[in-house]
Amino acid sequence: MESGQSVVFKIHSVASLYGAVAMTRKLSFMADLSQEDTVLIATVVSELGTNILKYAGTGEICVSRTLDEGHDAIQVVAKDQGSGIRDVNQAMADHFSTSGTLGMGLPAVHRIMTTMSIESSAEQGTRVVASKWLNGEKPTVSNLPKPDDHSVESDWIREVYDIGDCVRPMQGERESGDISLIHVHPSGLLLGLIDVSGHGPQAHTLACRMQQAALKLGCSRAAVILESLHQEFRGTLGAAVGLATLERKTHKLEFAGVGNINILVMGRERWRGVCRDGIVGERMNSVFLQTVQLHPGDLVVMASDGVSESTIQRNSSLYAEKMSAHALSESVIREAGKALDDASCLILRCLR
C-alpha cells in the first residue's frame, strides 16, 4: 500500500510479484525519475522478490523515496523469515546459486544500486537494504575489459559511444565459455564475442586465451584476427567468433564472423550481419567481410547463440531508449538468454 513516500508490497506468489513490479513503475514519488532509473528500480524489486519466493516462500518489499548518506535516493528493502543465507559473500558472486538457477539476483542488485547491505541468519531470516542515489553516484570502474582503460588516448570513447556487455554461464555452471572483447585504440574500436564449443572451466579457460590473443592484435582488421585465431588455436575445442571494427571518425563498422554469432544494427536503417559456417580452430572457410555505416542514435547488438535470435530481433521493448548499453545487455540476457547454454551480449550505442 502506497503512503506518501513509501509503499510496501506483500510477496507471496508469482502473481503478487508481477503486481509489485508493475506498480513500482507507476509510483508517484518516482514520477521524476528517468525511464532507465524506473526500469532499474523495478528490476531490483523483481530480483529481490524472486529470491523471497525461491528461498522463503513469503516476505515483503518496501520501496521508498528517502535520504541515503545525504543523497536523494530510492531505497528498496526486502525482508523474509526464511532460513537465511549461509554465506553472504558467496551469494554475492556472479552466477552462484543454491537452487539450480542462474544466480543473477543479488549480484545484479549490487550492480544496479549505489549502496547495499545484507543481514541474514537462520533465526531472523534475511533483510536486504539497497539504495540508488539520484543526485550523484559513487564513482564506479568502467566495465569495459580493455588494457588501456585509463590511458589519455581512450578518453574519447565515452563521448562517442556507450558500450556495455553481459556474459553468464549456462545453468549449473559457474564459468562461461562465452567471453566479450572490447579494445579501444586511438582511431577506433575492436568489438567481439567468442563462444567456445562446450561449457564449464575448460571452455572458459580457452575463451580467455582466445580473448587475450585477439587483444594483442587489437587494431588489426577483423579478417586478420580471425585468421590468426584459427591458426593459433588449431586442435582445441574451437569457437564461434564474431568481430567488428569501428572507425572513430567515420562510424564505419566492418564485421566478420565464423559460427553462430548474431549482429544487428537498429536505428536509421536496419542491418543484420552474416557469419560464415565453421569453427575457428577447427574448420574455417574464407572470411566474409561486411560493412555498414552507423549514425548517431544507432544501436549495435551482438549476441551468441545462447541468446534467442528471434527475441533480440523482434522484441523492441528490450531496448529502452534511455537505458545504458550495460543495462540493455543485462536486459537482453535476462529476457532472451537460454538456460541450457552459455549466453553473451554486447551492445554499442552511437552517441554522436
Image (tube, rainbow, N blue to C red):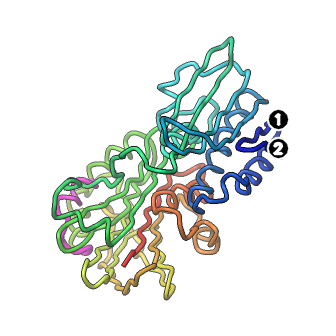
| Side of 206 relative to 185 (left or right) | right
Residue 219 inside the magenta-drawn segment: yes
The residue positioned 17% from the left and 70% from the top of the image is: 186
Q: Quick one: label 2, few (<14), some, or many (20+) residues within 10 Å? A: some
Of 270 and 152, which appears nearest the observer?
A: 152
Residue 317 position within the rendered picture, expressed as x and y whole percent measured from the top left: 64, 68
Kindly indicate the quadrant of the structure image that contains residue 159. bottom left
Per the rendering, the mark at residue 313 is none
Image x and y of residue 232, in percent: 20, 58
The x and y percentages for residue 195 are 41, 57
| 276, above or below 170, in the image | below
Q: Characterize the local packing of mark 1: few (<14), some (14-19) or many (20 or more) Cα atoms within 10 angstroms.
A: some
The stretch in magenta equals 210-223
Q: Left or right? Give the position of 98 relative to 111.
A: right
Q: Residue at x 25, y 77 (%)?
A: 248
Q: Which quarter of the image is occupied by the N terminus?
A: top right
Q: Please report contact status of discs 1 and 2: CB closer than 8 Å, yes or no.
A: yes
What is the secondary structure assignment of the residue under circle 2? helix
Q: Which residue is denoted by mark 2 in the rendering?
A: 16
Quadrant of the image occupied by residue 215? bottom left
- Residue at 36% from the left image edge and 64% from the top image edge: 241
Q: Which disc is residue 12 wearing?
A: 1
